[in-house]
Structure formats: structure tokens, C-alpha cells
Amino acid sequence: MKKITPIILVLIFVLVTPVFGIEAVQMSGEAPGNIIVLEKPEGYNQTVGEEYTFIVKAIDPQGDQVSFQWNWVNSQNPDDWSDWSDYDDHNTPQTFKHTWNYYQEQKIFARARDDNNPENIGPWTLIGVYNFPRTREAAQQAPSQQGLLLTMIETLTATTSQSSSCLEAETPVVAESSSLNAETVISTSE
């Protein structure tokens, strides 16, 4: 009798579920993919205190509704990230607005999750890099992204060629951070 009870319970569940319209919840599946940017501010230099509009969408492999989370300040601290947005149909453009109130360069990231399995979150996607200079003169003097990359490569090359051993001198170490969409991070080993 003890062995028959679990079998009977499973059989009842299988028979009763379709009759009463109860659907089994699928908890597996893939997270939404990278975010597709449909509209974002043009250019590198922006204005502090001005509201900017971003229109994005994400495609969920199972067609589930999606929600977005934003990292407006390129922070590793989850307390600095936005709350998750309301769910909406996948592959549907969603509009987000943000205003920056301080001066500095910002890398903006976003990610998506679906309503079927909210713990299964898609990757951070780099939406854009913007500079918020203090003055018009600072904006004109701000280095371009390509210029910054070339400067970093030149510094890395010069430091590496001057040092015969990593133990004798400080050497920049290049690492990739998978949590923020493979952004290059440069640090100095001691």
C-alpha cells in the first residue's frame, strides 16, 4: 500500500491538471539574450541635468515577457543598480529615461530576465559610454575612446618593455571581467 500511494497521487495530478486548466510551470529555459538598442543619445559628451532617453528590447528564446535592470553608473555594487522594470512582451521596445547629476565618464549597462524564471538573468550589455564634463572647454579636451585605448596600449607596451621581470617592476595586468560584458580592466600588480 505504501508503494502504491505515490503512484496514485501522481496519476491523480496528471489526470486532474488538464481537467481544471492547471498548467505546469516550466522553470527551465534560457535567459533573454543581449539587449538590442533601438535608440540612445548620440555622441560622447553629454550635459549634466538633462534627461536622456534609451529605447531597448530583448528577445527571449521561449517568448516569455521580459524585465530590464540598468547599471547607470558602471558600479559593481548592486545597491547602485536600478530596480527591475515591469514585465512586458519580449521583442517589444521599452523606453527608459535617466538624468545624471554629476560630472564624469559613465559606462551604461543593462540586462534582462524573463517572467518564467526570474533567477535566470541575461548578460550585462554595454549600452553606451558617455562623458559629462564640467565645462564646454573640458568637453573639447576630453579624450576620445580610441585615444584612451591607444594610450592604455602604449602604456602597457612601454611598461612591459622596460621591465625584464614581473617581480622586479610594476607591470600592468590585463584581465577580462565576464560580469560586465568582457570590459577590459587594467590594474597594477605589486
Image (spheres, helix red, strand yellow):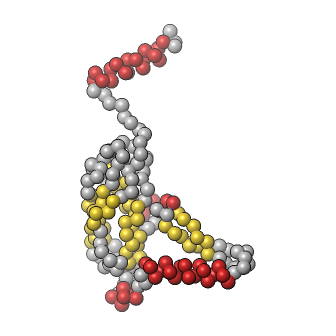
Residue 13 visible in the snapshot: yes
Residue situated in front as seen by the camera: 8 or 128? 128
Quick check: 63 above or below 25?
A: below
Q: Position of residue 66 (x, y in %)?
A: 32, 50
Quick check: 72 above or below 172?
A: above
User: Going 34% across and 75% down the picture, which residue do you hit?
Assistant: 101
Q: Is residue 145 left or right of residue 86?
A: right
Q: Is residue 117 left or right of residue 164?
A: left
Q: Position of residue 127 (x, y in %)?
A: 37, 66
Q: Position of residue 14 (x, y in %)?
A: 37, 21
Q: Assign the C terminus to one quadrant of the image.
A: bottom right
**Farthest bottom residue?**
137
User: Going 46% across and 82% down the picture, which residue do you hit?
Assistant: 147
Asked which quadrant contains residue 173, the reply is: bottom right
Residue situated in front as seen by the camera: 12 or 93? 93
Residue situated in front as seen by the camera: 100 or 60? 60
Quick check: 143 above or below 42?
A: below
Residue 69 visible in the snapshot: no
Q: Position of residue 159 (x, y in %)?
A: 63, 81
User: Going 52% across and 12% down the picture, which residue do you hit?
Assistant: 2
Q: How many marks?
A: 0
User: Going 26% across and 61% down the picture, which residue do you hit?
Assistant: 95
